[in-house]
């Protein structure tokens, strides 16, 4: 059985989690840091692709450069893969969350898993999702996946 709203789970106690949600500033810092890391990831991905087959990579880059939809689609797919891998492997943490001492947890107290990471990543590619924090009660990728970002107290 999962813990109630007033009683923390053993996992939360073990991880030193507070039930206090991360502040908007912590979430903004997470976003900025993670997007910088994502851009570096894209750069290295392109670099590796160019090392493997420079000619084909150049053709591909020219093909998507003028096509907004294709460029957006490729970026969304790579973003979903990036966030799913990072949050899935690190149990709900990214470099931004590590620096700001926050973590993603499920609202029901169950352990955060790969499915949760994938669903959060899918929600992140919804247009204007980043702005959802300013209109309503938090980010859509938290609400739709029944997760939240909380502070770490230890």
Image (cartoon, rainbow, N blue to C red):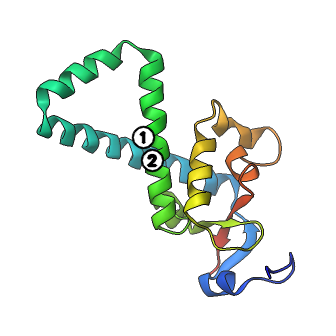
Q: Is residue 51 left or right of residue 148?
A: left
> Which quarter of the rendering shows the N terminus?
bottom right
| Label pair 2/1, CB-CB below 8 angstroms | yes
What residue is disc 2 on? Answer: 81
Q: Is residue 142 left or right of residue 45?
A: right
Q: Is residue 11 left or right of residue 60?
A: right
Q: Residue at x 43, y 49 (%)?
A: 82
Q: Is residue 96 above or below residue 65?
A: below
Q: Is residue 154 visible?
A: no
Q: CA distance from mark 2 to mark 1?
A: 5 Å
Q: Position of residue 31 (x, y in %)?
A: 55, 48
Q: Position of residue 130 (x, y in %)?
A: 64, 39
Q: Secondary structure at mark 2?
A: helix
What residue is disc 1 on? Answer: 78
Q: Is residue 39 left or right of residue 24?
A: left
Query: Which image quarter: residue 105?
Result: bottom right
């Amino acid at each position: 059985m999962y813990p109630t709203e007033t009683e923390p789970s053993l996992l939360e106690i073990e991880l030193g989690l507070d039930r206090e949600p991360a502040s908007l500033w912590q979430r903004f810092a997470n976003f900025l840091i993670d997007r910088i890391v994502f851009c570096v990831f894209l750069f290295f991905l392109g670099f590796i692709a160019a090392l493997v087959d420079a000619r084909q990579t150049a053709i591909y880059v020219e093909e998507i450069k003028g096509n907004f939809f294709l460029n957006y689609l490729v970026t969304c797919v790579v973003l979903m893969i990036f966030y799913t891998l990072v949050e899935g492997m690190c149990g709900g943490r990214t470099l931004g969350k590590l620096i700001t001492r926050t973590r993603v947890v499920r609202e029901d107290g169950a352990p955060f898993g790969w499915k949760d990471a994938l669903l959060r990543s899918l929600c992140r590619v919804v247009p204007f999702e980043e702005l959802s924090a300013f209109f309503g009660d938090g980010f859509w990728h938290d609400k739709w996946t029944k997760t939240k970002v909380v502070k770490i107290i230890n």
